[in-house]
Amino acid sequence: MRAMSKKITAPHQIRGAMSVKRPISTKSNTPDAATIAIRLNHENTMLSWSRNGVISTIAGCAMLELTSMTNGEKDVIYPGGLGMLGMGGCFFTIGAVNQIGSSLLYRHALKLSPAMCAWNFFNALWPISIWALSVKRMFELHPGWHSTLASTAEKSPESSERK
């Protein structure tokens, strides 16, 4: 009975098993409730910019496809869709600049380590990179978009009234 009542200790409690006890987090880098709230707000701001960029990009792509389908001209791209695509790119860019700038500016208040700052930079830059590559690829599929945009502007009623 005596052997069963003996207390089993964890390896870190056995004498000599660990010479140095290192806490997982120290008081200086443990975020408190206010810091966690600021970090969540920081992250939600980036997600809002990204969400608006996705919505604008989808609307721009839909406008481009619908106008080309209704007019029967596949390679003609109209300015409304390009404007929405541009607005999506602006949302992604502003969100990335805001995320990187506030990560650098408030890194001490947010208690961000260098690794967390690098992670924030990566998370800020990949959406705009994917957006730019996707839009570039879309315009490669419609190679005559720049020339047809100019000819569309010449065909508009406002341009014929000016002449």
Image (spheres, helix red, strand yellow):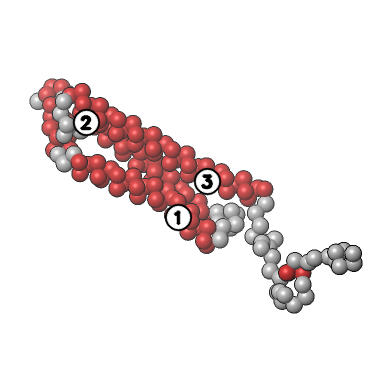
Q: Is residue 108 above or below residue 79?
A: below
Give the residue pinned by disc 1: 121
Say which amino acid is labelled 1: Phe
Which one is earlier in the sequence, the residue at label 2 or at label 3?
A: 3
Residue at 39% across, 50% down: 126
Residue 84: horizontal and vertical position, in percent?
A: 32, 34
Q: Are marks 2 and 1 in contact (CB under 8 Å)?
A: no
Residue at 52% across, 62% down: 114
Give the residue pinned by disc 2: 78
Q: Are marks 2 and 3 in contact (CB under 8 Å)?
A: no
Binning the other alpha carbons within 10 Å of mark 3 as few (below 14), some (14 to 19) or many (20 upward) gives some
Residue 82: horizontal and vertical position, in percent?
A: 26, 35
Can residue 97 be seen from the camera position used here? Answer: no
Say which amino acid is labelled 3: Glu
Residue 12: horizontal and vertical position, in percent?
A: 73, 69
Which one is earlier in the sequence, the residue at label 3 or at label 1?
A: 3
Residue 4: horizontal and vertical position, in percent?
A: 85, 64
Q: Does dot 2 land on a helix, a strand or a loop?
A: loop
Placement of the C terminus among the 4 image quadrants: top left
Q: Quadrant of residue 6?
A: bottom right
